């Protein structure tokens, strides 16, 4: 029996995680959860999981009202509350489905407390990959990825001799605007960007898919997760999102993980700690994998992954700058403050202007995140008033 703490229960990944926990109460016991502003979900979750003892919400006013309504539970709020619920919970497994930088510290705290971490929060590894890798090397906790691409890579690598792998190919749909030119992107709106062709996801990750910053993040995540050479990890365009990742072997053959675009499978792979049945598909050429479309990644059409590689190669806290600038730029676009193409401009300018700190600790990364956000907000306002 795994005692589970679910962070981000009201989001897309969180909701699908609850589906799996509810379907197998003999194996899982939900003992705590967090959510943001969608507190209307609280009664249903508590009704479905009477084992819950600890709950964290985002706002203090919600914390006060819910604490009065459910006095038998332990309540927490805000970023400190996320740390507090991890410290206090008797969960041995934490599912981190939080969105953005707010998920990084909970990932570090979970491992420090020797918990099994099922990780859907990209920013934890993009920003804090070195810290997390260090904790794992010290024997602190365990980590299982939830992203469909990294679950696919984990499956594939479990069936081969790594010395025989030439490249890891992370597939990309191209997002909402894959059929538009750079010129056409000047006029796109947030509503257009949120209409993803194959996946149903939250707003922030859907915009990252449209810029393909998410693929830059995923390449960096793969580096931290699998310690495979970055220069041999590439992006492969694949419209249907059925082939989640591919290994190109040194003998020229391919090995792929293929399934419909549904996150229940990757979540289950993490929750059951890889103990699930799966099939992999060998092929002599990509076209043999099925009636799918594959294409070469165009770095000029999609500059964002290149910015992620630039930040990684800069070292230090540069990926914290990358993430914070991207996050603020995405929300500025969603709020109508900047055009779509300016997201890349904002990230590029932040990387050029903000001082890079070598060998940052956790406090350094938190400070970098704060300073970068302040920088981007000022820049966006100056841009709007110019």
Image (tube, grey):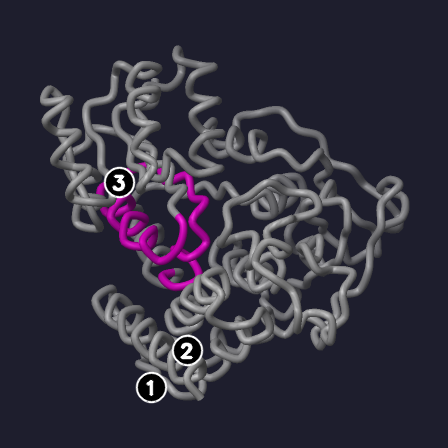
Estimate the x, y position of residue 11 in percent, counting from the top left: 43, 38
Cβ–Cβ under 8 Å for marks 1 and 3: no
Mark 2, other Cα within 10 Å: few <14 / some 14–19 / many ≥20: some
Residue at (45%, 44%) from the top-left corner?
Answer: 120
For marks 1 and 3 on the same chain, the one whose residue lies earlier in the sequence: 3
Task: Using the image, determine if residue 360 lies above or below residue 276.
Answer: below
Task: Using the image, determine if residue 90 lies above or below residue 143.
Answer: above
Residue closest to the eye, 225 or 24: 24
Which numbered disc covers residue 114? 3
Q: Which residues are magenta?
A: 99-128
Which numbered disc covers residue 380? 2
Task: Using the image, determine if residue 77 lies above or below residue 269.
Answer: below
Which numbered disc covers residue 355? 1
> In this image, 311 relative to 252: left or right?
left
For marks 2 and 3 on the same chain, the one whose residue lies earlier in the sequence: 3
Task: Using the image, determine if residue 321 lies above or below residue 352.
Answer: above
Estimate the x, y position of residue 263 in percent, counting from the top left: 57, 35
> In this image, 58 relative to 384: left or right?
left
């Amino acid at each position: 029996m795994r005692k589970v703490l679910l962070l981000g229960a009201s989001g897309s990944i969180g909701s699908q995680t609850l589906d799996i926990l509810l379907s197998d109460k003999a194996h899982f016991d939900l003992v705590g959860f967090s959510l943001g502003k969608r507190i209307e979900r609280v009664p249903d979750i508590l009704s479905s999981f009477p084992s819950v003892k600890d709950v964290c919400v985002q706002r203090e006013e919600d914390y006060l009202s819910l604490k009065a309504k459910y006095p038998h539970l332990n309540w927490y709020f805000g970023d400190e509350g996320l740390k507090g619920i991890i410290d206090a919970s008797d969960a041995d497994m934490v599912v981190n489905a939080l969105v953005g930088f707010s998920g990084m510290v909970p990932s570090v705290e979970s491992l420090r407390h020797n918990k099994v971490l099922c990780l859907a929060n990209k920013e934890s590894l993009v920003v804090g990959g070195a810290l997390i890798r260090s904790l794992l090397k010290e024997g602190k906790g365990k980590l299982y990825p939830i992203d469909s691409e990294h679950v696919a890579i984990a499956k594939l690598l479990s069936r081969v001799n790594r010395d025989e792998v030439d490249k890891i190919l992370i597939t990309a749909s191209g997002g909402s605007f894959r059929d538009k030119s750079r010129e056409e992107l000047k006029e796109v709106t947030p509503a257009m960007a949120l209409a993803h062709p194959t996946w149903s996801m939250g707003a922030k990750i859907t915009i990252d898919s449209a810029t393909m910053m998410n693929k830059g993040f995923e390449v960096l995540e793969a580096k931290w997760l699998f310690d495979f050479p970055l220069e041999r990890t590439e992006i492969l365009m694949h419209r249907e999102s059925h082939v989640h990742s591919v290994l190109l072997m040194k003998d020229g053959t391919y090995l792929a993980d293929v399934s419909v675009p549904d996150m229940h499978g990757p979540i289950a792979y993490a929750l059951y700690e890889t103990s699930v049945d799966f099939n992999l598909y060998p092929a002599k050429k990509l076209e043999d994998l099925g009636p799918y479309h594959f294409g070469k990644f165009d770095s000029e059409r999609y500059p964002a992954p290149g910015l992620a590689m630039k930040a990684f190669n800069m070292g230090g806290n540069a990926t914290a700058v990358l993430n914070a600038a991207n996050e603020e730029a995405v929300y500025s676009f969603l709020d109508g403050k900047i055009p779509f193409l300016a997201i890349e401009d904002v990230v590029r300018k932040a990387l050029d202007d903000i001082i890079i700190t070598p060998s940052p600790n956790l406090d350094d990364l938190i400070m970098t995140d704060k300073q970068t956000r302040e920088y981007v907000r000022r820049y966006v306002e100056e841009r709007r008033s110019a």
